[in-house]
Image: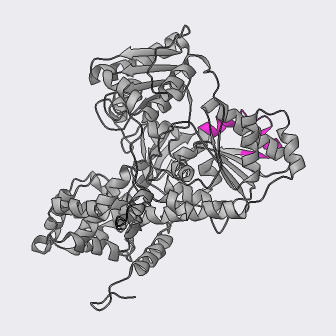
Amino acid sequence: MTDTPDHTPTPDERKARAEAAMRAAEAAAGALDGRDAPEPAPRPATPPAEPAGGPEEGLRALGGLFAETGVPAALASRAAARLGPGAAGRLRDDPWRLLSVPGVQPGQADHFARALLGGDARPDDPRRGGALVLHLLTEAARQGHTVTPAADVLSALERLRFPDPRRAVEAALDEAEVLSLTEEPEFDEEAFEDGAEPPEPEETLGPARWALAEEAAAEGFQRLTLTASPLLDDAALKGLRDGLPEDRSLALTAALRTGVSILCGAPDALARTVAAIAEAAASQGVRTAVAAPTDRAAADLAAAVPGGAAQGVAVTSLHRLLEPREDPSAAPGAVVYGRGEQRPFDLDLVIVTDGAALDVELCAVLAEACPDGAHLVLCREPGAPPPAGPGRPLDDLEASETVPVVALDPEPPSGPLGAITEAVRGGELAAVDAPGREVVIVPAEDAGEAVHRAVQLVTDSIPRALGIPVEDVQVVAPAAAGEVGAGALNAALKARLNPGPGAFGGMDPGDRVVVAVPLPQAPLGETGVVTGGGPHGLEVDFPGGAAVVAPAEASRLRHGWAVPVALARGTRRPAVVAVLGADGLSRPLVATAFGLARRHLSVVQAAGPALARAVREDGAPARRTRLARLVAQ
């Protein structure tokens, strides 16, 4: 329907329009991108035709536009990756689309619009208003929120000096990029008995991309719960349970009896229990798959499942299980999966080893890929941090009280590594006895010394003293940015381990890289080694095989000697160097970083008393989400 002065779209019409646009872009439940830094989906309006010369011609056109308007040329590749080959045409039609490119701020987009439009770049332009609203919601999504109170958005627009904040929201809603959602307040029984007026429903705003993914995930969980029936009869299940400890027996029963269940436990206990459930189910003819976060983690897990494929258990990364595929029609920056509602898994039981890492989009993809009657087991470590992307599906699912949650009995920590990790989970930064140098604490006075110590540990101390080669050492940090962030650490490690000019988009053969935004060829957090490159793309050897990453997708890779904890989670390494400054610390993050080490952990302590305080007091920041209520409806 065309909007006219006599017809303002209703919320249902706007939602239907958003759903149609998102389906067309495959950017909600059918596609996945932006785990490391969530970005808005491309606008649903029909884009200008792709330049005749394809991506290279599009990049040249974009470079010309940026030269004309004084935009740094370095931004061209990011803009092309975000907006597609027709980016120059899109930006000429609406210069504020530049705000959808990661790293661009409102003032920079305004400057670009003035350079392009001159006096026609008005502060109250609806295109500017819609772009600002989506930018604010996307920034909130970077903090994990799927919805934001409308009042907060209006206040932020006032601070940005948009003349009519409500008009800006209406513009965003009309573009079908944002949904207006009503949050019913929690029922207050005491206030009701006192005769107080009930609070008014709160209006919230959410990017259509994540709002629709959250609804798809909720519908998927409800469907699996309602269509589930026991995978084995009582006699067969009793036979499998005989002799098992009570917690393992309950976990097996939940997996085989209910459509969706949550399994919680320490990493080693989880791995053993998952392997036992998978083997037991497969031995009875139940088609079973175990999905790990990365191909490297899947290979480690496969070694723990005796017989593996011979027993009928598929052990792989969730990325591979969903069958990523190239799709030229996909939205820029999206990964499209072959498995989904139209082509579900040929499986009866799916076990995801790090369910806490799933954000709402990946959760929606997974739920839709499970056929009616399939059983889904989502595993988590106690106190696991939230996912890198928006939402907190596993926490919400547990809070909905609609699925069984089985907690494995605590076990005595296994050695110094287990002891320090368990102490942190309990809120204490305790000293541990490590006669075999399993845990080493390295104090650092400042950021410069912390980086120097980390490089020394990776390149000399750990290989020399412990015999662990450099390629088996992973450096982790709380975040990518900052003086002791992954970026600074990677610059120092590259200078020492593989100096070079960055001939291929900042990379050289021999560089270790990490996938910061999922690729068709590799999942989020997968590390690999660059083997070559050229105009055709970057050649990378990943654990799942060699791949060529196209130039437009190369920006999804970062140097990977050091990685943020959010990307490293779920994939353990023989040795870990955790570099901890005062910023970005929380108990879940520190526990996850320590738990990544199999044989050795070095902690470069540059946080001072902030580290003990964070472990003692700081949980993960709260996130505003809707999934718990949606599932419980």
Q: Look at the image and give the residue range highlighted in magenta.
A: 297-314
Percent across and percent down for residue 531 are 50, 38
Where the N terminus falls, by quadrant?
bottom left
Judge from the rendering whether residue 352 lies leftward or rightward of residue 430; answer left or right: right
Residue 89 in the image: above or below residue 552: below
Q: Give left or right: position of 101 versus 595.
A: left
How far from the left and from the top, in percent, is residue 39?
38, 57
Quarter holding the C terminus?
bottom right
Rendered position, 616 above or below 480: above
Q: Residue furthest left?
A: 119
Outermost top residue:
435
Residue 509 in picture, x, y percent from top left: 45, 36
| Res 10 quadrant in image | bottom left
Q: Is residue 516 above or below residue 572?
A: below
Q: How is the image coloured?
A: one colour
Q: Nearer the viewer, residue 523 or 165?
A: 165
Which residue shows up at 58% across the image and 53% down it?
401
Inspect the magenta stretch and tell me whether residue 467 lies in it: no
Residue 299 placement: quadrant: top right
Residue 227, placed above or below residue 590? below
